[in-house]
Image (cartoon, rainbow, N blue to C red):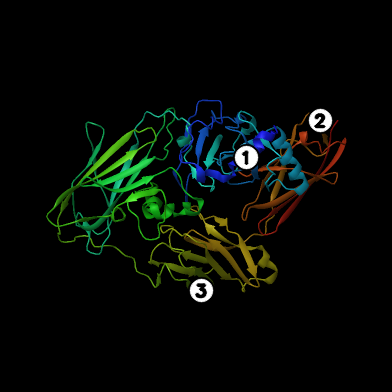
Amino acid sequence: MKNTLLLCLLIIGGLGLQAQQSVPTDYFSNPLDIPLILSGSFGELRSNHFHSGLDIKTQQKEGLPIYAPADGYVSRIKVAHYGYGKALYIQHPNGYSTVYAHLQKYAGAIEQYVKENQYNKESFEVELFPDASRLTVNKGDIIGYTGNSGSSGGPHLHFEIRDGASRPMNPMLFGIDIPDSKKPLINSVMAYPISEEAHINRSQNPVKLRLMLQKDGSYKAEKITAHGKIGFGVSAYDQQDGASNKNGVYKITTHYNGTESFKVLFEKFSFDETRYLNRFIDYYYWMNNKSRVQKLFREANNPLSVITNENENGFITVEDGFSSNYTIEVTDFKGNVINITVPIEGSNSEILEPKTVAKTDDFIYANQATSISKGKFSVYIPANSLYEDTYLDIQAQGDTLLLHEDVIPIHKNITITVDASNYDPKDLDRLYVGRLNYRGDPYYNTTTRKGDKLSAYTRTFGSYVLVADTTAPSVKALNFDDGKWISKNETLRFKITDDLSGISSYRATVNGKFILLEYDYKKDVLTYDFDDGVITDSENNLKLIVIDNVGNSTTFEATFFRK
């Protein structure tokens, strides 16, 4: 796999993309040797981020070979329980890099290199940055196998192409061809009064428009009456051929009376800006209706670069007595288009539905840091944690903090601190701050303690509670019994669970030697592969220690025999 000429090209290519004027469309080949069908597209709206690549279906199975789409070298490897799971990063001579996530395993020398480092560090989770000469690859080499590791909802390959500044770009720009003959689909269109005097259909609150399908496949909204500065939003998605997944669209363009007003284009973005998705969408509508409406205007504290053109920040001003038309054009990468027309009649009529604002004792200025105390809790909100000034409803009820509702996005971590001085000092280390889920169960937040005060960070409003966890994790062997011969086993497998704070760490030895266990948190299963070659004796004494997030531990011991 090593290639001296390749290394020379990589050094020359170190200038990156700065010298390039266009995206190469014939440089990268497909990473999989199957028809490419997507379960997720580039720029798709996800929870707290834009999707940074293509999710390629792998025919509902794992273990398909992944091929290097161009020459390069492995620049980074990350193995994690969550997120990308087993991920691989390849740097290419032209300055671009490619990323492969949710792998089942790596291939050849890469897999060997990872295993060596995992055993040296005695950790399944590792992050490695090999030298450029260590793991070179040629176009067409097998670099790994598709899987379902990390925070993956099913077998697939997450594939990215990044530029010289590590910004993800739409792989379709590079000639990765995804058949798509379907027009985008429209869920809904919203209209928003913006200025103090603005109203739509005599309301100062957001209005969902009634859409009527036209014979040519376009949509026309029922005429609205409006006055003042207003904006619009659209909920839309795309479907490529061969799948029914609701994927993201490529481009949205708006016009007001024939003049372009706003354009959003999903070709490239920076990871530093991706959380601003929560400012870009109607977060309140999303949390209440589970439909993401993209706001077709730029509000304050929205630096998104995917907005590529705007006139008056995408807002329009409707004057009394004037008729006008607002149009929305939604386009997929293959050029399939759906159009929406919104007829507008300017009318400064009496407002029948004033803007609703739920006022509370706690008004937060977005550009100022704020500290709030309620009962035994205190909340610190750093400056610019919120996108706009707002009232928050914060109440304390014993060990529970009602921290508003999750209908307002939080950009930066806020701190929740709770005074636990009423607890027995010996129990303090078993306490944590948990966020209550929809079932009322406390989800563990990373919690630190200083004296009798516990603190946790969060970027989600909701209900938080002080929880005591005194129960150790549960460990059960799945494919062997204590004292038995298991010569035919290919693996050792364990079920590990914890009812409250969750699993923090684990470590296993056989005859005093560390063995590598792979943790599948979605199935609560730990697996050791005998092919690692650590176990060579006939009689083997196993010891597995599992620790939860507040320090409760369980030690599982067993003896097994192998020929």
Q: How many marks?
A: 3
Element under disc 3: loop
| Nearer-N-terminus badge (3/1) | 1
Query: Can you say whether 452 is above or below 129 in the image?
Result: below
Element under disc 1: helix
Q: Position of residue 107 (x, y in %)?
A: 68, 33
Query: Where does label 3 land, which residue?
Result: 375
Q: Between tags 1 and 2, which lies in front? A: 1
Q: Is residue 334 left or right of residue 347?
A: right
Mark 2: which amino acid?
Ser
Residues packed near mark 2 inside 10 Å, few (<14), some (14 to 19) or many (20 plus): few
Query: Where does label 1 land, which residue?
Result: 10
- The residue nearer to you, when weighing 381 against 108, is 108
- Taking the view exactly as shown, the residue that stands out farthest to the top is 34
Residues packed near mark 3 inside 10 Å, few (<14), some (14 to 19) or many (20 plus): some
Element under disc 2: loop
Q: Residue at x 64, y 72 (%)?
A: 452
Q: Position of residue 363 (x, y in %)?
A: 39, 71
Query: Can you say whether 374 is above or below 33 in the image?
Result: below
| Nearer-N-terminus badge (1/2) | 1
